[in-house]
């Protein structure tokens, strides 16, 4: 299981509680946690962590909507690029041409899925129970998926980013058509 079970809220009581949360480049991980048969989210940020009384998939969906898209559109776009049917990394938004890409560890609809921000991952190492993901904020997290699977997800993010940047460059290419004024002067 990728998520942690907490016996009490003492850990969570120390965390800031927020009911609505939108991901950003400072959101490094969304991890499901279980308490009293309810799923909530432990959000790891660059400089701390927050408890959100919502499922990770809810946070991802709301974030896509907040930035003007939808989870379905983000997933469909990624699938077109990656020709991939499941566990598709998605671009939630972009900031001046830098895509905010999140990758799922297992099926996004699974209650055990953990979401990682692609740009926050520094390294991935195998361990006896799966793999350890090292983040740029010097924290590490163990997840119950193989390092090979995590490397594969990371590689898909790289392909998605490259395709996104290529499409952004296409927007600023010179037109291959004559300008309208040149056409009228003939």
Image: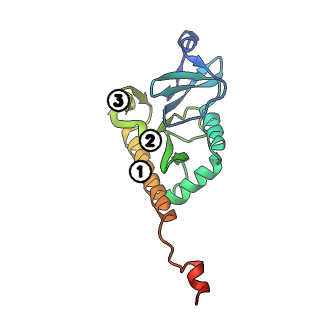
Q: Is residue 140 left or right of residue 54?
A: left
| Local crowd size for mark 2, using a 10 Å CA cut-off: few (<14), some (14–19), many (≥20) | many
Instruction: Sort mark 1 into few (<14), some (14-19) or many (20+) by Cα contacts within 10 Å.
Output: some
Q: Are marks 2 and 3 in contact (CB under 8 Å)?
A: no
Element carrying mark 3: loop
Asked whether residue 87 is in view, the answer is no
Give how far across and how far down residue 73 sits, in percent. Answer: 63, 52
As drawn, the residue found furthest toward the front would be 185
Q: Secondary structure at mark 2?
A: helix
Q: Residue at x 54, y 54 (%)?
A: 78
Q: Which mark is residue 128?
A: 3
Q: CA distance from mark 1 to mark 2?
A: 8 Å
Q: Earlier in the sequence, mark 2 or mark 3?
A: 2
Do labels 1 and 2 touch, CB within 8 Å?
yes
Tell which residue pokes out farthest to the bottom in this image. 186
Please provide percent x and percent y for residue 115: 51, 36
Residue 89 x %, y %:
51, 46
- Residue identified by numbered label 2: 118
Query: Sequence order check: which comes first, mark 1 or mark 2?
Result: 2
SS class of the residue under badge 1? Answer: helix
Q: Are marks 1 and 3 in contact (CB under 8 Å)?
A: no
Q: Is residue 129 above or below residue 178?
A: above
When the figure is inspected, residue 140 is found, relative to residue 184, above or below; the finding is above
- The coloring applied to the image is rainbow
Q: CA distance from mark 1 to mark 3?
A: 26 Å
The answer to whether residue 43 shows anywhere in this view is yes
Task: Residue 32 in the image: state x and y as whole percent.
Answer: 56, 27
Quarter occupied by residue 38: top right
Which residue position holds label 1? 158
Residue at 44 percent across and 41 percent down: it is: 118
* Residue drawn at the location 56% of the way across and 78% of the way down: 179
> Marks 2 and 3, how far apart in space?
23 Å
């Amino acid at each position: 299981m990728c998520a942690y079970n907490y016996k009490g809220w003492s850990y969570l009581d120390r965390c800031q509680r927020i009911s609505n949360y939108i991901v950003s480049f400072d959101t490094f991980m969304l991890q499901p946690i279980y308490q009293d048969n309810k799923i909530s989210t432990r959000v790891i940020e660059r400089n701390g962590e927050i408890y959100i009384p919502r499922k990770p998939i809810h946070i991802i969906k709301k974030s896509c909507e907040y930035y003007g898209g939808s989870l379905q559109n983000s997933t469909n776009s990624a699938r077109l690029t990656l020709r991939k049917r499941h566990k598709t990394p998605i671009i939630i938004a972009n900031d001046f041409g830098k895509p905010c890409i999140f990758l799922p560890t297992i099926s996004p609809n699974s209650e055990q899925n953990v979401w990682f921000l692609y740009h926050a991952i520094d390294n991935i190492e195998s361990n006896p129970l799966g793999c350890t993901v090292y983040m740029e904020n010097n924290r590490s997290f163990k997840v119950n998926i193989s390092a090979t699977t995590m490397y594969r997800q990371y590689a898909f993010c790289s392909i998605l980013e490259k395709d996104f940047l290529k499409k952004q460059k296409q927007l600023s290419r010179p037109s291959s058509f004559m300008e309208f004024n040149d056409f009228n002067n003939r």
